[in-house]
Image: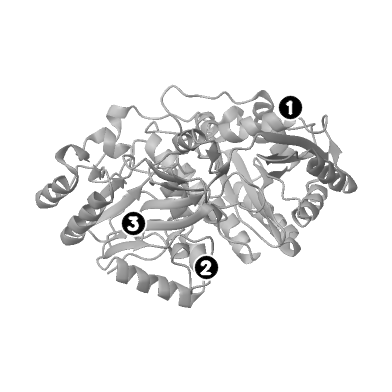
Amino acid sequence: MRWWGWGEDGAAIALPEPAARLLAEELDLSGSERGTRVELADVRVPDPSLPGAARRSLEEAVGEGNVLDGMEERLAHAAGRSYPDLLRLRSGDASGAPDAVVLPQGEKEVAAVLGACTDAGVAVIPFGGGTSVVGGVEALRGGHASAVTLDLRRMDRVLEVDRTSLTASLEPGLMGPQLERLLGEEGLTLGHFPQSFEFSTLGGWIATRAGGHFATRQTHVDDLVQSVRAITPTGAWESRRLPGSGAGPSPDRLLIGSEGILGVITQAWVRVRPRPTIKASRAVAFDSFMAGAGAVRELSQSGLDPANCRLLDATEAQFNQAGPPGKAMLMLGFESAHHPVEADLDVALEVAAAHGGEPQDTAGKDDDSVGAWRDAFLAMPYLRDGLARLGVLSETFETAITWDRFEALHSAAMAGAREALGAKATVSCRFTHVYPDGPAPYFTVLAPARRSSEVEQWDAVKVAVSEALINAGGTITHHHAVGRDHRPWYDRQRPAPFARALVAAKRELDPVGILNPGVLIDPAD
């Protein structure tokens, strides 16, 4: 990706006219200063401080040409893509850059790199696509004098496809489009399409427990992982390939979501499926978001398991050109590789109608609302760059909560954001995933950015909404991971004995504490 934002150089998506009108009406940007960015030559990247002996050891591990310390390569690994990350980069602050970027070809080289860095006391930041929005890939040293980023881009092969068991062995550096293209040659799909799909990797999905394509049932990458292999500073960690097991706590579950602090994922067996060829979708309008929520709750408990069941409030729908003005919109979809799905969609529409839902087009066909929402969903990371140039603060918060507590959480989060940002702000909500026992609400906040104090403004709303989510009984993150931005609330969410157990696991697997210091737990002494 380009160093200052989302996507490749030259890629840009215009702000849709309804979204621009909403911003003009709600935010009044007439007096806002436009956001600017410095030129590449003016970016401040610290001088590399990797000791000569450590560099030589790394070159022996991966080859001289695969230890890179040029300014542009280090800048490309200086931060993720959260709002404060982008503010820092656009202002020319690349203080989070590693001292070098190391490119292993395979797990033997990964093991050699971890051994060299353990001996030298050099921090190691595992890196996939760099799409973290929670401060998960910045090269913080955690008490070590130097840090390197371990970029897994060269480990990008499909190692084996087991068509009998419908599983595949994949390397962690596979990015979403490449992974799907290679599986597609076999007529298969992983069926995992996060919003970051274009630039994120399999290893990153597993390390952060990413949420994907399906709005019901297999919502997280956890559900698609059969086994994981990782290299830790004290040895290899590999679980057995099994469809299920009751043999004690799952070794996979400790690695999935470990965010690079326990080991480097080098291979995973994942569950794949035939590519769906039969699809039917429909948009349904509701007079209110809560009426739509009632329909979604019944659908999530019905056993129909729609592939898409995403509810947008009226503001979210307007911003994404997804339906008539003033209406909450439900995006319903079913898909299969084996059987017709129109009957399932018809039953789902009957459920929605019982809650006041009005279907927007001919049954079984993609309509304009569904297509517009899908395009807007994929474009949103690009649009955030445009919003920053317009002088707009843009941030999202995602959580999950049981149905009985959803309305209270929704009210608290909306009020907290508005109080933190003031009158000139818009706050919207949608469901990204739904379960029989509760939804995963996703809040978007937009406000005029206060020039030169954007980070403080972001921090205020981050604290306000995060406090509301935790106090209402929700999780601090449903699928964005913890990183460093969510640490204060993650510490409150997890049980204290579990935190001590995680520290003990870290100490056993990474005794010098070189792996991603400060993520999930405090850096080692």
Looking at the rendered structure, the kind of residue marked 1 is Asp
Q: How is the image coloured?
A: one colour
> Please, what secondary structure does the residue beneath circle 3 have?
loop
Circles 3 and 2 in contact, beta carbons < 8 Å: no
The quadrant of the rendering that contains the N terminus is top left
Precedes in sequence: disc 3 or disc 2: 2
Disc number for residue 245: 2
What is the distance, in whole Å, between disc 3 and disc 2 at their CAs? Answer: 30 Å
Q: Quadrant of residue 88?
A: top left
Q: Which residue is mark 3?
A: 516
Q: Which residue is mark 1?
A: 368
Drawn side of residue 273 relative to residue 100, left or right: right
Q: Give the residue drawn at x 30%, y 37%.
A: 75
What is the distance, in whole Å, between disc 1 and disc 3 at their CAs? Answer: 44 Å
The quadrant of the rendering that contains the C terminus is bottom left
Q: Of tags 1 and 3, which is closer to the observer?
A: 1
Tell me if I can see residue 145 in this picture.
no
Q: Give the residue drawn at x 26%, y 45%.
A: 104
> Please, what secondary structure does the residue beneath circle 2 have?
loop
The x and y percentages for residue 237 are 34, 62
Compare residues 489 and 147 and report the one nearer the observer.
Answer: 147
Precedes in sequence: disc 2 or disc 1: 2
Compare residues 91 and 122 and report the one nearer the observer.
Answer: 122
Drawn side of residue 215 relative to residue 354, left or right: left
The x and y percentages for residue 66 are 21, 39
Q: Give the residue drawn at x 79%, y 38%.
A: 342
What is the distance, in whole Å, between disc 2 and disc 1 at their CAs? Answer: 45 Å
Disc number for residue 342: none
The x and y percentages for residue 144 are 23, 59
